[in-house]
Image (cartoon, coloured by chain):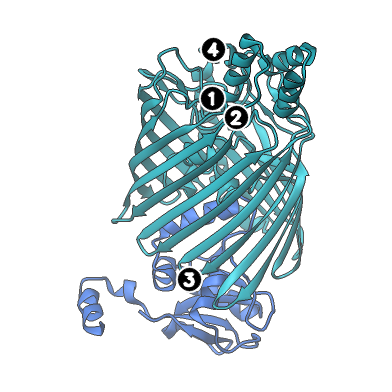
Amino acid sequence: MHRCLRPNVNHSENYREALGNALVIALVLSALISQAAAADDSLPGLKLHAFGTGALNYVASGNADFVRDLSQPDGARGGQWTGKIDSLVGGQVNIQLSEHFEIVGQAVSRHRFDDSFTPELTWAFLKYSPLTNLDIRGGRIGTDFYMRSDSRLVGYSNLTIRPSVDYYGGLPHQYIDGMDGAMTFELGEGLLRSKVFAGISPEKFPLENSEPWNISGSRVFGGSLDYQWRSWQFRFGYAEIHHERDLPGSFAQLMTVLSTVPGTASQAALNALRVGETASQHYSMGVIYDEGPLQVQLMVSGVTSDSAFFQDAVCGYFLTGYRIGEFTPFAGLSWSKSTPDTLQSTRVPALDAAIVNTIGRTETNQHTFTLGVRWDFHPGMDLKLQWDAIQGDTNSLYNYRWEQADWDGRMQVLNMAFDFAF
Amino acid sequence: MKIALLLVSLFLPISALADLVLIAHIHAPVDRISRDEAINIYMGRLRRFPSGESVQPVDGPAKAQFYRLLVNKELADINAYWARLVFSGRTSPPRSFEQNQAVLDYVSANPDAIGYVERTELNAKVKVILDMEH
């Protein structure tokens, strides 16, 4: 059943060419940025920045496509090499208009929902800072659902090659069109930063054997509290998504069938599964300890949904690293576990099976061990080696694409990456 | 502890142990700030003096030593930290100068600026607001 839910993408071999183009763009961009930075004094209000990752992944075992998150339609499975999971390049321009106003625009080329590396506008906002401790931004802004989720694409800022798939993989939302506001207060010996955001999603996500799920128009809002005290940082966050419409493809077909089957059970199933005009809630908390060469991160989140299609889930990760000279070895453990809703039988066995399989598409039950090392060999650049071992059950499907019939929930991935940021 | 530091210092180049001080314009609204307040300003968490006025930190040539003293971090960690803040559109890192004299000139000319230089290079237009102790 999972196979009929596969992404409908054109599996061209051209991605290598696209990846190559992206890396060439990265190098050219780096050179341009360096020159621009050198000439920065002539335009003190204008700053250009770039970041990127060139990565190579080898999926040693596991018969499903390993992807970075659900915004990617495919990745690589056991025995395959790929560079498209983590490779990306981004450019950013900051224009300081005055003491209180700044414009920021950022575009990123990455493997995205339509199997292309078409650049996307990820940030484009006007920031107004009327007080020294208050920032208000309007325009396109990155999603800040979880701690550090608004800088997920910046490999150079992270210890690992990619943010934990168990934790962030089910969160494909990258940006919204809207506003946010953040205010910082002195509290005790630390700083409390409160933030609220609201907007409309303009994004699309790849789906199985259908056109992408267009979530544009979905309302998103939330907020967070961060407390920074010396080497400690604590955060509590909440975000809510009001889905504008149902999923297309096999999900829509199932809904159509349910709407034509008489009986209260089928109508109840129809109402329970409906995604359009329902909401999902994301609760999260995180703790970071960052002192000298040691850094430790622990984050936990819970996701609930009004729709039975999206299983409620609890995810988390623990990551620690210790710098020794230019090298920072790191180790992590992450997990994700969902709980499916059980709907009343429609008394049509085939329909019941379709409902169970559809709900099963969002099931996750796995944990991942990660080991790696980061080498800061040059200012603004690093090289990373990383090994991920995923242990899950056969029904753990949510964070993958293209599961094979013999998918057993286990996967090993070897990764190497070059990051830069200027 | 001091003996240990002395022993360590024997194996470090003299320049790595320069006597750094954090300075502000002679007419800046504060005379001293705490190390925690300096961390908040330099790490982009809250860029204002304790008295509430806006403050603009600048980096100088002793950047590596300064951040080691301030937050016990290497420059690679600081660069990664700033990459996160810059590319999430939050704030920008301190403006950077390659010469101590340029830091002194900038702070001397801007009442809202702070910077760090070696104590031996101080002039009458700036004042020390924090001693960067080893």
Q: Which residue is mark 1?
A: A21
Q: Which residue is mark 3?
A: A230
Rounded to the nearest angstrom, the CA distance separating label 4 from label 2 is 18 Å
Please give the name of the residue rendered at 74% of the width and 66% of the height, measured from the top-left corner. A99
The tag earlier along the polypeptide, 2 or 3, is: 2
**Chain B appears in which tint?**
blue
Rounded to the nearest angstrom, the CA distance separating label 4 from label 3 is 50 Å
Q: Are discs 4 and 3 located on one and the same chain?
A: yes
Q: Secondary structure at mark 3?
A: loop
Residue A399 position in % (x across, y down): 51, 29
The tag earlier along the polypeptide, 1 or 2, is: 1
* Chain letter of the residue beneath label 2 in the structure image: A
Please give the name of the residue rendered at 49% of the width and 58% of the height, measured from the top-left corner. A287
Please give the name of the residue rendered at 42% of the width and 42% of the height, measured from the top-left corner. A334
The tag earlier along the polypeptide, 4 or 3, is: 4
B75 sits left or right of A139 in the view: left
The tag earlier along the polypeptide, 4 or 2, is: 4
Q: Are discs 1 and 2 located on one and the same chain?
A: yes
**Chain A appears in which tint?**
cyan
Residue type at numbered disc 2: Ser
Q: Tell me if label 1 and label 2 are in contact, CB under 8 Å.
A: no
Q: Secondary structure at mark 1?
A: helix
B13 sits left or right of A244 in the view: left
Rendering quarter of residue A57: top left
Pair 4/3: label in front: 4
Pair 1/4: label in front: 4
Rounded to the nearest angstrom, the CA distance separating label 3 from label 1 is 43 Å
Would you place residue A417 above or below residue A227 in this image? above
Rounded to the nearest angstrom, the CA distance separating label 1 from label 2 is 20 Å
* Chain letter of the residue beneath label 3 in the structure image: A
Q: Which residue is mark 4?
A: A3
Q: Secondary structure at mark 2?
A: loop
